[in-house]
Image (tube, rainbow, N blue to C red):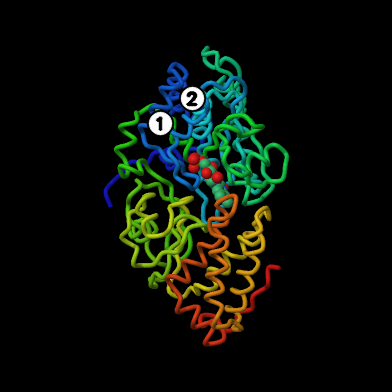
Amino acid sequence: MVSYEKILTKNMDTPGYMGTLPEYRATGGYTAFEKALKMPPAEIIDIVKKSGLRGRGGAGFPTGVKWSFIPKTHVGQRYLCCNADESEPGTFKDRQLIERDPHQMLEGIGIASYAIGASVAYIYIRGEFDLGAKIIESAIQEAYQAKFFGKNLLGSGFNLEVILHRGAGAYICGEETALLESIEGKRGKPRTKPPFPAVHGLYQAPTVVNNVETLANVPYIINRGAEWYASIGTPKSPGTRIFSVSGHVKRPGNYEVPLGITLREMIYTCAGGIRNDKALKAIIPGGASAAFLTPAHLDTPMDFEAIAQIGSMLGSGGVTVMDEETCMVQAATNLLEFFYHESCGKCTPCREGSSWILQVLHRIERGTGRASDLDLLETLCRRIEGVTVCAFGDAEVAPVLSTLKHFKEEYVAHIEGRGCPFQPNVELVMAH
Ligand SMILES: Cc1cc2nc3c(=O)[nH]c(=O)nc-3n(C[C@H](O)[C@H](O)[C@H](O)COP(=O)(O)O)c2cc1C
């Protein structure tokens, strides 16, 4: 693997670094915000566009382009929302950024808010991040005291209030419009789009929603330039990315690497290979919503395009690795239990379909599956895919469709052998 410079995790890798404001300042922290406040907002958007930065929350949408969608003629309130919900199973990089170096995110929030003309920024943090919420709260207070937040920042005339909003533990509230509903005090259910948040967002005002890691990149882009950032990674997927690697690897953890390294480098070089030197069986490359891949895909570059081309997605950057002893029917069932539990219930295909899929998976795993169940699973999935208000529907069918595609023989072995060949006496507790 080529040598590379870490950006977002560099400070926190320094022994003793606690992420306080004085420490962050000592590494050049908030100089990008000071610089940005002297620039016209349109120039900042242009730099971020040119850098090629793409959203790290899941969809990989170009960040500068998203900022430019805020209607220029709009007079009145605009909002920035930082998405710190991080509920995607297998993903834990935003948590590290929040707990270990929160001012990077806060500085990014400051710059993004100024660029889009938002005088109020919300940070929506998942309910379970208790420590993270306390750390952000104290970092926000530090930033107010240092006059990075508040009124007339550094004499620019720009005002910014930053508010931490704690969620209550619903996965769907990571979806940007459900997040907005939740901040407004309503049940977290996705809105139909269009209109997109850039036009009708929080309290119907123009709003940008960006992920923690996306925003944390912004200060470095402003300080070191769009060309520098674009020179890292691949032409269409620039920059570094923090991948959360978990499962059957020797060294699970967060790894910041340039986009475009191969899955093989990620699993075998960064994460030390498969635990107990077993054989690799399956990889989820981008959180639970991403389709399973196989060892045949190991030499695929980890960038948005290459992973999409092989039928999966880079998603949230959560890489889950499974060894040869993993039952793929159980793995898919495990994820479906999660999705069934988290379906918000707004769309009938997702609400009802997840229950049916789970029932079929449970009976296959328990040994009472029928030969017709494989076609039934496929049909159920196809009736959810692409027809729901948000991408949750596509996410919940991905584990089933991709295990059916790559590991069909395991489903057949369960049905013909009347039970799980990996754990013959498995007892599943029905989730409903
Ligand atoms: C079901 C669902 C859950 C999501 N959860 C998260 C999340 O926890 N964190 C996040 O940043 N984005 C999440 N997203 C993506 C957001 O809707 C949105 O695209 C993202 O916050 C935009 O930020 P970005 O452009 O910086 O990536 C989720 C999307 C869906 C459909």
- Which residue is found at the position 54% from the left and 23% from the top? 117
Residue 193 shows in the view: yes
Return the residue at label 2: 115
Describe residue 354's horizontal placement relative to residue 223 as left or right.
Answer: right
Disc 2 residue lies near ligand 1 with CB under 8 A: no
- Which residue is found at the position 64% from the left and 62% from the top? 340
Residue 2 location, x and y as percent? 26, 49
The image shows residue 107, relative to residue 415, as above or below, that is: above
| Ligand 1, image quadrant it occupies | top right
- Report helix, strand or loop for mark 1: helix
Return the residue at label 1: 48
**Kind of residue indicated by mark 1:** Val
Viewer-proximal residue, 392 or 85?
A: 392
Question: Quarter of the image holding residue 348?
Answer: bottom right
Describe residue 74's horizontal placement relative to residue 236 as left or right.
Answer: right
The image shows residue 322, relative to residue 54, as above or below, that is: below
Q: Work out how far the residue at label 1 is from the one at label 2, CA to CA, in angstroms.
A: 10 Å
Viewer-proximal residue, 289 or 324?
A: 289
Question: Quarter of the image holding residue 209?
Answer: top right
Residue 429 location, x and y as percent? 67, 73
**Kind of residue indicated by mark 2:** Ala
Viewer-proximal residue, 262 or 250?
A: 262
Which sits earlier in the primary sequence, circle 1 or circle 2? 1
The image shows residue 312, relative to residue 112, as above or below, that is: below
Residue 256 location, x and y as percent? 40, 47
Mark 2 and mark 1 in contact (Cβ < 8 Å)?
yes
The image shows residue 232, relative to residue 282, as above or below, that is: above
- Which residue is found at the position 33% from the left and 60% from the top? 264
